[in-house]
Amino acid sequence: MEFFPPRTKDGATNLLHKFENMGAGGPLFCDITWHPAGHPESDEPTSCVTIADAMFNYIGLETMLHMTCCNMKTADINLHLERIKSKGIRNILALRGDPPVGQEDWEGNSDGFNYATDLVKHIRANFGDHFNICVAGYPNGHPDATSYEDDLVHLKEKVDAGSDFIITQLFFETADFVKYVQDSKAKGVHIPIIPGILPIQGFASLRHICKLGKMDVPDNIMKAIMPIKDNDEAIRNFGVDFAVKQCRELLDSGVVDGLHFYTLNREVATIAVLKQLGFWQEEPHKPVPWRVARRAEEIRPIFWSSRPQSYIHRTREWDEYPNGRWGDSSSPAFGDLKDYHIFYLKSRWSKVKLMPMWGNEIRSEKDVWEIFCCYLTGEKNRHGEIVKCLPWNDYEIEHDGETSLIKDRLLELNRMGVLTINSQPHANAESSTHKHLGWGDKGGYVFQKAYLEFFIDRKYLRNLVQTLAKSDYESVNFHIVNHDGSTDMTNCDKMEPVAVTWGVFPGREIVQPTVVDPVSFRVWKDEAFTIWLEKWARLYERTDESFKILQEIHDSHLLVNLVDNNFKGNCLFQLLEEVIRV
């Protein structure tokens, strides 16, 4: 699926949330069109490299970045390529590019980058096989080529220069693509050719895209959409139906290796097409039980499971990640959140939307409890709003996910003022394909210890410590800390992590993706407490009663995590009920 960099910071923020929505369907990869936004080393939020970096490293989608060589010097091209490489991106769509604005015809480049072939050769000569290189194909011939046959010759040149696969310009007739594939093979092109599909979403956008590609909209399509050209919904429905028909014809032809969608940064039409084709994976299989994965990282502290983007940001400069088993936990240097990237510091929810969700007016601590409860139940709060997220979450709760297995017990705790922010049920040799708990290779078995993390009033500290000391709960590890660290208690080693999730798979070592790491917990503690003030209380004036109540919770509550090492059961809810009812 293809996206383009937006022009504004707010547009960039919104686009990242679209990545999450569309990435949920399990695409093979997504790509970003070229727009460098200044100097090759620029970190402008709207630059294509920054957007691609976010897609790959923060959202966890396989990413391909377009790159043009039009009007670019060798030094700048190398700077761009080195920066792309530093982000971990290994896929490039190499293009010549369009002439500068105001210039009708293409003119040569003084540094010798006159065609996409030149860029492919340069990348291969200077970066070897580090990058997978894609090039463009034109089923109706490149608009600047002297002929269709001549364009096929140039395609073969790009392939011979080192291209790995081809994505085509959009087209309207399936027969044109089939013929193009056959003609390309006759020229000796034997790499995958992926058809470019445009779900028509509007009259103006269709004409604009065809103008850019120097294409004509076929008469039959113009005749169909002219009567509805001012009705966006009707045109989108037509576009979805046309794209589905086109895709089915392509799939039935037996010549395609995939489908590439020009999304125009809109998810509705593309998702509708994919669902009708049966390609949309409502529940894609997870390689690890995290929402955001990095190839170099196989294990992660569980604390950030609800805030993966914060974790990715804080660890973005790490050269190495703990491999297989959690290594020296004292070595990771977690970055500060004070410069948290605009994309992630800024919520998808504006203050106007957050206030009704989290309380236009908080009159007591029990009003806060209600917000936590509504988040779990999906019911409306007293302001008539559905609580779609809490301040400690990067995303909305999955009511049908693993939380559903313990939701009722979590709800009981929150109604008593035990404010849960992270949890997982126990699992004893569940199938790796289990609907809620499964992850990793098929044919494996997954295990996990019951885990709970919550805020609780300091008045329960004595009861909590005494209950934890009972023989009934000798299988429980705990960490207890307050906002300034003056209370800091644990029955764990100060350095050794505790495994809380692991999997056993055919032909592999045991995989251990999540741990409770005491060193990381001290970093997470600061973030977890700060959220009370920086994400919630700041919605109100400092003189408001609502602000004072949230400030008091921040000051008076403890952050606690509990692990039941007996992974065959879960005694944590019983333990906490004893604590509260003593």
Image: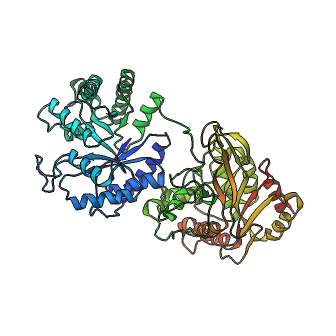
Q: Nearer the viewer, residue 536 or 399?
A: 399
Q: Quadrant of residue 83?
A: bottom left
Q: State how many labels appear.
A: 0
The picture places residue 481, in percent across and down from the top left corner, at 70, 71
The picture places residue 234, in percent across and down from the top left corner, at 35, 31
Residue 467's place in the image compared with 14, above or below, is below
The C terminus, quarter of image: bottom right
Residue 95's place in the image compared with 514, above or below, is above
* Residue drawn at 40 percent across, 58 percent down: 87
Residue 496's place in the image compared with 95, above or below, is below
The picture places residue 395, in percent across and down from the top left corner, at 55, 52
| Outermost residue to the bottom | 486
Q: Say if residue 371 shows up in the picture.
A: no
Q: Quadrant of residue 356?
A: bottom right
The structure's colour scheme is rainbow
* Residue drawn at 22 percent across, 52 percent down: 69
| Outermost residue to the right | 471
Q: Nearer the viewer, residue 526 or 295?
A: 295
Residue 68's place in the image compared with 194, above or below, is below
In the image: residue 141, left or right of residue 230:
left
Q: Quadrant of residue 246?
A: top left
The picture places residue 149, in percent across and down from the top left corner, at 16, 29
* Residue drawn at 26 percent across, 39 percent down: 159
* Residue drawn at 62 percent across, 44 percent down: 508
The N terminus, quarter of image: top left
Q: Say if residue 153 shows up in the picture.
A: yes
